[in-house]
Amino acid sequence: MTIPTDTAFRGFPREGLEFLAGLAEDNSRAYFDAHRDIYEAALLAPAKAFVVALGEELRARVAPGLRAEPRVNGSILRINRDTRFTTDKRPYKEHLDFWFWEGDGPSRAYPGLFVRLRQPAVIGEILGGIVLGPSVLGLLPGNLPQVLFPADVRPHLTVIAQLGLVLFMFIVGLEVDLRLIQSRRRVATAVSLSSIALPFGLGAALAFALYPAHSVAGPESDAMLSGNSCASRLADCLRGMGSRSHCTSEYVDR
C-alpha cells in the first residue's frame, strides 16, 4: 500500500475507498479492528489533509471566518455510529463525513457546510447490471436469463432501461461542475480523448488480427458475387425487355 507521507492533500488512496466498500459488506468490529491500520493511513490521514486544503479554499471563496479543524470530532465526524437513538445497530458508518462551520463554540450550533465521502453508488449499479446479464447468469444452469427475462417482457424492460438512462444522464448533467472542468481542462480533455481513441485503436488492432482467419475472400465468395451479378443483370433484363424467354436464354443458360 502506497500512502503519501507529506501533509499536502494528494487525494484519497484506492485502499481507503476499498476499506469503505469492505465495511459496507462486513460492518463489524472484527473487520474494523483487522483493518484499522488501513483506516488510519489510507482514510483518516488523507482526510486531515483534505480538511486543511478545502478549508483554505472555502475561506478564500465562501466565508473568511469558516472553521476547518483537521481532527476527529472537529471537521472530521466520527466513523463510529451512535446506536443509542437509532434502529440501525451497525457499529460503523459506511462513509466519512466532514463539517465546516462558521462561528465560535459548539459547531452544531452554527451554520456550515457538510461533505460526505463514500463509494459511488454507480459502482454497485454497474456490478448489478453485470451480474444480471448473461455474462454471469448465463454461466449458471437452468437458462436463468430466459426464465427471469422472458422474450415478451424484454421490450418493456428496454423502454424502462432507456428512461432510466435518460434520467441518470440528466442527474449527471446537473451535478457537473463546469468550473472544476475548466480548472482541470487538460486532464478532462486527455480523459475524454483517450476514452474514444483507446477503444477505437484496440478495435482496429483486433480487426487486423482477426481478418485473416475470418475473411470471406476466396473462390466461394467470388462465386457468390458472380451469382449476385448475374441475378442483377437478369432483373434488369426482365424490366427492360419484358421477354422472359430471351432473358432466360441469354443469362440463365450460361
Image (spheres, rainbow, N blue to C red):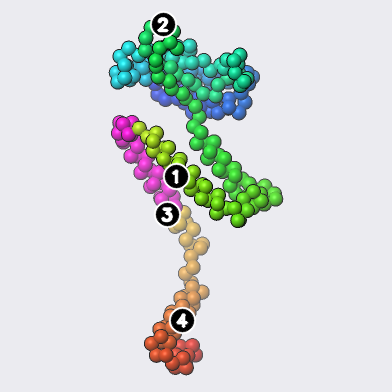
Q: Are marks 4 and 3 in contact (CB under 8 Å)?
A: no
| Residue bearing mark 2 | 105
How many residues crowd mark 1 within 10 Å: few (<14), some (14–19), many (20+)? Answer: few
Span of residues in magenta? 178-204
| Residue bearing mark 3 | 204
Q: Amino acid at mark 4?
A: Ala
| Residue bearing mark 1 | 166
Query: Quick one: label 1 or label 4, which is nearer the N terminus?
Result: 1
- The image shows residue 59, relative to residue 123, as above or below, that is above
What secondary structure is marked by label 2? loop
How far from the left and from the top, in percent, is residue 13?
47, 26
Q: Amino acid at mark 1?
A: Val
* 3D distance between C-alphas at marks 4 and 3: 34 Å
Q: Residue at x 60, y 28 (%)?
A: 25
Label annotation for residue 45: none
Q: Are marks 2 and 3 in contact (CB under 8 Å)?
A: no
* 3D distance between C-alphas at marks 4 and 2: 91 Å
Q: Quick one: 251 or 86, which is closer to the camera?
A: 86
Q: Quick one: 93 or 187, which is closer to the camera?
A: 93
* 3D distance between C-alphas at marks 3 and 1: 30 Å
| Residue bearing mark 4 | 231
Query: Quick one: label 4 or label 3, which is nearer the N terminus?
Result: 3
* 3D distance between C-alphas at marks 1 and 4: 47 Å
How far from the left and from the top, in percent, is residue 172?
42, 37
State the image quarter where residue 129 is shown: top right
